[in-house]
Amino acid sequence: MLNIIWLVFAGFWLAIAYTVIGLVLCITIIFFPFGLQCFKLARFTLWPFGRAVVRKPGADRPLRLIGNVVWIIFVGIEMAIAHLLTGVALCLTIIGIPLGLANFKLIPLILLPFGREVVRRDQAQGRGVFF
């Protein structure tokens, strides 16, 4: 039920933003991996409940670090602000409080998406769950 409410009030709009940004980033060859991250985040923001963010096995640390730093500079801060504003707006209503809190929990993933993957909650056991 929360996923449906989320989809209407936050998920659809955030997914559109991630998809548009992802398409713009995929136009260039250099930022193509960042566009793919946007598409991953768009899928997750559409239907977040019942899913978890875990460490990606075998993620190369130096590349992950460089990717996350570049991501924060070009995309991460803006999208984190979008989640913060959406979370505050949702928390203004009683029914939106769980959705607003979910937006706040997404901010660490939005800031540092490289080296993490989204899986079903039942597949996340013992894998370093972030959200």
Image: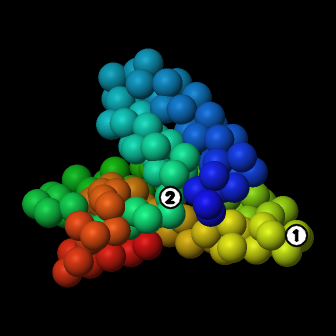
Callout 2: few (<14), some (14-19), or many (20+) C-alpha neighbours within 10 Å?
many
Question: Looking at the rendering, which quadrant does residue 35 occupy?
Answer: top left
Tag 1, which secondary structure? loop
Count of picture labels: 2
Tag 2, which secondary structure? loop
Counting from the top left corner in percent of width and height, residue 47 is at 51, 52
Question: Mark 2 sits on what residue?
Answer: 48
Q: Is residue 56 positioned above or below 75 on the image?
A: below
Counting from the top left corner in percent of width and height, residue 83 is at 67, 58
Query: What amino acid does circle 1 point to?
Result: Thr
Which residue appears farthest toward the front when viewing the image?
Answer: 1
Taking depth in this image into account, of 30 and 81 the one nearest to the observer is: 81
Q: Is residue 49 positioned above or below 19 on the image?
A: below
Question: Looking at the rendering, which quadrant does residue 66 occupy?
Answer: bottom left
Q: How far, Cα to Cα, is label 1 from label 2?
A: 20 Å
Which residue appears farthest toward the left when viewing the image?
Answer: 58
Query: What amino acid does circle 2 point to?
Result: Pro
Counting from the top left corner in percent of width and height, residue 38 is at 46, 41
Q: Is residue 13 positioned above or below 66 on the image?
A: above
Counting from the top left corner in percent of width and height, residue 40 is at 40, 44
Q: Residue at x 35, y 30 (%)?
A: 32
Taking depth in this image into account, of 60 and 84 the one nearest to the observer is: 84
Of the 4 image quadrants, the one containing the N terminus is bottom right
Q: Residue at x 88, y 70 (%)?
A: 92
Callout 1: few (<14), some (14-19), or many (20+) C-alpha neighbours within 10 Å?
few
Asked whether the beta carbons under mark 1 and mark 2 sit within 8 Å of each other, the answer is: no
Question: Mark 1 sits on what residue?
Answer: 93
Q: Is residue 67 visible?
A: yes
Q: Is residue 78 visible?
A: no
Mark carried by residue 72? none
